Image (spheres, rainbow, N blue to C red):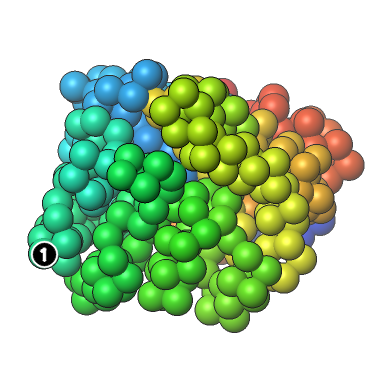
Amino acid sequence: MALHVRGVLLPDDEVRDLWLVGDRVTFTPVSGAETVVDGGFVLPGLVDAHCHIGIARGGAPITSLDQARELAHIDRDAGVLAIRDAGSPYPYPELDEEPDLPRLARAGRHVAPPKRYLRDIGVEVDATEVAATVAAQARAGNGWVKLVGDWIDRGVGDLAPAWDADTLTAAVQAAHAAGVRAAVHTFSESAVEIMVRAGVDSVEHGTGLSLDLIDEMARRGTALIPTMINIATFGGIAEQARGKFPGHAEHMLALRDGFPEVVRAAYEAGVPIYVGTDAGGGIDHGLAAEEMLLLHEQAGMAPIDVLAAASWGARQWLGFPGLVEGGLADLTVYPEDPRRDLRVVRAPSRTILRGQVVR
């Protein structure tokens, strides 16, 4: 049965009627449709653009499809109807079209340097194997690969690039040659500069960004997914490291403390910014609304721009059309205007995924 929705459609800011026929949106009236929304503010379904439904709480890989489903359901119930899984140690292509799960844009496993990343999460390879591994992980995902651009180097005692600049650049080129986009995990100043100039498609975290590099990202259209919830955990990382690596501890704290201004500068420069929580491992699922609030409160993003970063803008970036004629039938409804009080996004009053009411 077709569904009928009426409310203030954002970002159009008009009271509109739309009909959901199967998994598609139309503005042409459908006789006999059931009205399931009559009032409120209607957004294309939210997106978590940096999420891991393949990693369990605590950092271990999941071991079953049911675990992935359970984590995805937590996000769905918070209004997130599309996820970019930014690297999974557990393959789950079977879930790409599962009707009650958020839409999935997936990377394969993280491509990481040997013994310099989270245990059992990435495919750990030396420089000679990086390009071939990227090509293999491109086939394992459905449009993305995930590169580990830096991590602590115990010989240096601080963050350092995962491989040399030529290898990192070749990794991005290998992803593009395979027809996918490349995302890079990076905290440090040196690695993020290499990766932006190499043409990476998205910077995950990006605490080491400089003003010059932010301008370069804006010029290239390189996306930033700040994961501010994740960066808030740097204090714990620093405390664990302080005994053996005091310089690393101080560096992580400085990156944390300066990060809101980094994100603010990127926003003001016009860098595309999208909402991502880094859920999985150390971050709980279902926190997209909290990430949205941090982008507003700490980085100064206007509510309408935060909503774009979490909804219609992020969906367009990932290739999941919003609430347009022929678009996908995913929407979240809020009883009050989230542009006036962004806290409203914590509690959607109605959620519809693939043309079916799930809340």
Residue that sits furthest to the right in the current view: 340
What secondary structure is found at the residue carrying circle 1?
helix
Horizontal relation, residue 137 to residue 151: left or right: left
User: For the residue carrying disc 1, how many other residues have a C-alpha within 10 Å: few (<14), some (14-19), or many (20+)?
Assistant: few
User: Measured from the top left, where is residue 77 in percent x and y?
Assistant: 53, 25
In the rendered image, the residue lying farthest to the bottom is: 219
Residue 134 lies in quadrant: bottom left
| Residue 30, visible in the rendered structure | no
In the image, residue 167 lies at what x, y percent? 24, 69
Query: Would residue 129 be visible to someone looking at this image?
Result: yes
Q: Which residue is drawn at 74% across and 53% down?
A: 261
Amino acid type, callout 1: Thr
Total labels: the figure holds 1
Residue 90 vs 14, above or below: the answer is above
Where, by quadrant of the figure, is residue 184 drawn? Answer: bottom left
Residue drawn 43% across the image and 38% down it:
51
Residue under label 1: 128
